[in-house]
Image (cartoon, rainbow, N blue to C red):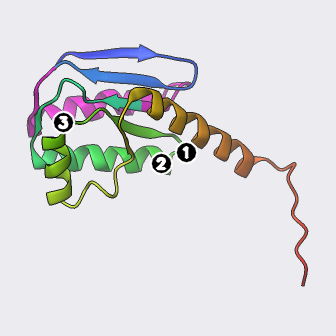
Amino acid sequence: MEIKINTKEKFTALTPHVSYIYDNMAAELVATCTNILASPVKNVILNLQEVTNIEEQAAIAIANTQQTFYDANASFVICEINSEIENKLEQWELLDILNITPTESEAWDIVQMEEIERDLLDSDDVEFDVEE
């Protein structure tokens, strides 16, 4: 599978250049994502603008990969999916658990907001007074 990789300061955008993601192709996509998770810039935006169809096991593999990223304190956002894929994700009950945005620009915003949120939550500088 040909995948365009575009690394930015806070994330790496992956754009598969295929129209159909078959189950057997998902392993390559997951491996590419997992390799990025081990890099200094570990947030991923998966742009599916060229993908017109996906098999169920491939979609499940992507959902599991998203969870792996969040477990590792990294962002994983999917963008630019078409309505056919959206309908399939809904049918497979994956749409509500995936972090999906309409555009790549909105995906960038999500990654940046999640980075800020992680920085704030990890900061020892913030103290809250709790009244009893």
- Graded by Cα atoms within 10 Å as few (under 14), some (14 to 19) or many (20 or more), the crowding at tag 2 reads few
Q: Which residue is mark 3?
A: 26
Along the polypeptide, which appears first: circle 3 or circle 1? 3
**Badge number at residue 46:** none
Tell me how many marks there are: 3
> Label 2, label 3: how many angstroms apart (C-alpha)?
19 Å
Q: From this view, report whether residue 39 is shown above or below residue 78.
A: above
Residue at figure coordinates x 55%, y 45% from the top left: 73
**Residue 120 is one of the magenta-drawn residues:** no
The circle on residue 70 is 2
Q: Amino acid at mark 1?
A: Asn
Identify the mark nearer the N-term, 2 or 3. 3
Mark 3, other Cα within 10 Å: few <14 / some 14–19 / many ≥20 = many
- The answer to which quarter of the image holds residue 84 is top left
Most foreground residue, 34 or 81: 81
Q: Helix or strand or loop: what does disc 3 sit on?
A: helix
Q: Position of residue 122 (x, y in %)?
A: 72, 48
Which residue is at a point 46% across and 33% down the rendered structure image? Answer: 106
Q: CA distance from mark 2 to mark 1?
A: 5 Å
Left or right placement of residue 75 versus residue 52 in this view: right
The residue stretch that appears in magenta? 18-44
Q: Hey, what amino acid is under mark 3?
A: Ala
Q: Residue at x 87, y 48 (%)?
A: 125
